[in-house]
Amino acid sequence: MEVMVTISRREYARRRRALLHRMAPGAVAVVPGAGVFPSGSGLEAAFRQDSDFWYLTGFAEPDAVLALRRGREAAGKGGDQDEAILFCRARHAREELYEGERLGPERAAKALGLDAAHPTAELDERMVGLVGAASVLHCSLGEHPGFDQRLSGWLAQARAKHSRPAEDILGLKPLLHELRLVKSAAEIALMRRAAEISVQGHLRALRACRPGLTEGDLEAELLYGFLRGGARAAAYPSIVAGGANACVLHYMANNEPLKKDDLVLIDAGCEYEHYACDLTRTFPVDGRFSGRQRALYEIVLEAQRQAIAACQPGALFDAPDAAALAVMQDGLAGLGLYPPADERPVKVPPERPAFCPHRTSHWLGLDVHDCRGDRPDGVRTLEPGMVLTVEPGLYIPPGAQAVPKKWRGMGVRIEDDVLLRAEGPEVLTQGAPKQVSDIEGVMAHG
Ligand code: GLY
Ligand code: MN
Ligand code: MN
């Protein structure tokens, strides 16, 4: 039996404390949860909590808001403590008949370990007071336009009441995502589980694959594996791309037949307890790599091997990308698709060949493209507890006229999720076969 892992109430409290400690005395952070989006039919679309809100509360209901207020140290002992205040939906018998039980403000503070909880009906009135007294306001503007309007209404009302609301409105993410970047032991356990389930989905697709099936047939195998494994959903729209469709990086139609002489690229991972897996494998539809498929595939595989080896604590975020690019440049040169080394100007960072259009890594966690911590210049040091993807890809579009015909219309990406540990990288998704002989073995024998 699977042991259910979750995040403890104590850990959520630790996260709120860590955020509060990064805030100035008297500062207030406002973190709205996700709202519900009516479908028009009376049935709501699937609800997914906002990741920042979830990280700080573990509260899954819609239409909630968290306010964190940093005490004013000058006020002295006992006088002005840090506070965590939740606004959530009031209990409502009729609505709960349709939607299920609500926690309700009466129970929420104790259940979630917060200082206070109030019904959303009191949000406006209480927030005018809170933001009116804040020294600095932290929020993520531009994410929920309706919420931004409400916030500016609170500020206007506070001014009208002659209080002097914060002049400094600062982002929340620069503080919060520094915390989210480094995963706790409990988070790593959840991400391991998301990876294991996703691997099982990929294995189902690999075993089922044969010419004549459609891309959608393999997607069905993936989703079956995810749901049977205990996940409730895919972490992002699954990509099942046969042949040249693999050259569309975020292909999602998934509705074409799989052809005998093609590769198929599957980029799919589940979400487990809000944590994402992001996993890509590319393999031959008929179970045997042809010479040209293997030539391209082995370049990407070696690029990925070297990029994973570059995932070391203390290395820069861009180190895996640079390692992958160097291998892919040489590999393409070996096929006559890129200038040989002695004809290339030495560039740091290495030039990105047109057939390698995307970066090699992004952070992974509650969101598939997690956190804001990879600076555009890649100057970010990798630390133990960070999780990033390593996903080099080579794509030769069908219209690449300058390239001999046999290479056109092939796309290969190999993506794993890598946990940084003090002793080096750990590949969370290693159970999904990627060596040529392993893929061919599973496809031949199951
Ligand atoms: N699945 C999207 C990505 O690999 O970034
Ligand atoms: Mn992916
Ligand atoms: Mn990815």
Image: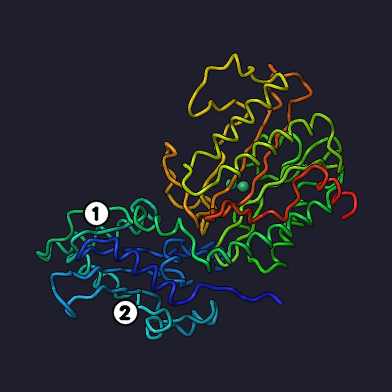
Does residue 307 appear in the picture of this structure? yes
Amino acid type, label 2: Asp
The quarter of the picture where the N terminus appears is bottom right
* Residue 434 percent across, percent down from the top left: 74, 46
The quarter of the picture where the C terminus appears is bottom right
* Residue 349 percent across, percent down from the top left: 49, 29
Residue sticking out furthest to the front: 423
Residue at horizontal 17 percent and vertical 66 percent from the top: 133
In the rendered image of this protein, does residue 306 appear above or below residue 269?
Answer: above
In the rendered image of this protein, does residue 282 appear above or below residue 217?
Answer: above
Q: Secondary structure at mark 2?
A: loop
Residue sticking out furthest to the right: 445
Q: Along the horizontal axis of the image, is 279 left or right of 66?
A: right
Q: Quadrant of residue 4?
A: bottom right
In the rendered image of this protein, does residue 407 appear above or below residue 192?
Answer: above
Q: Along the horizontal axis of the image, is 441 left or right of 426?
A: right
Residue nearer the viewer, 54 or 416:
416
Residue under label 2: 115
Give the mark nearer the N terminus: 1 vs 2.
Answer: 2
* Residue 407 percent across, percent down from the top left: 75, 25
Residue under label 1: 169
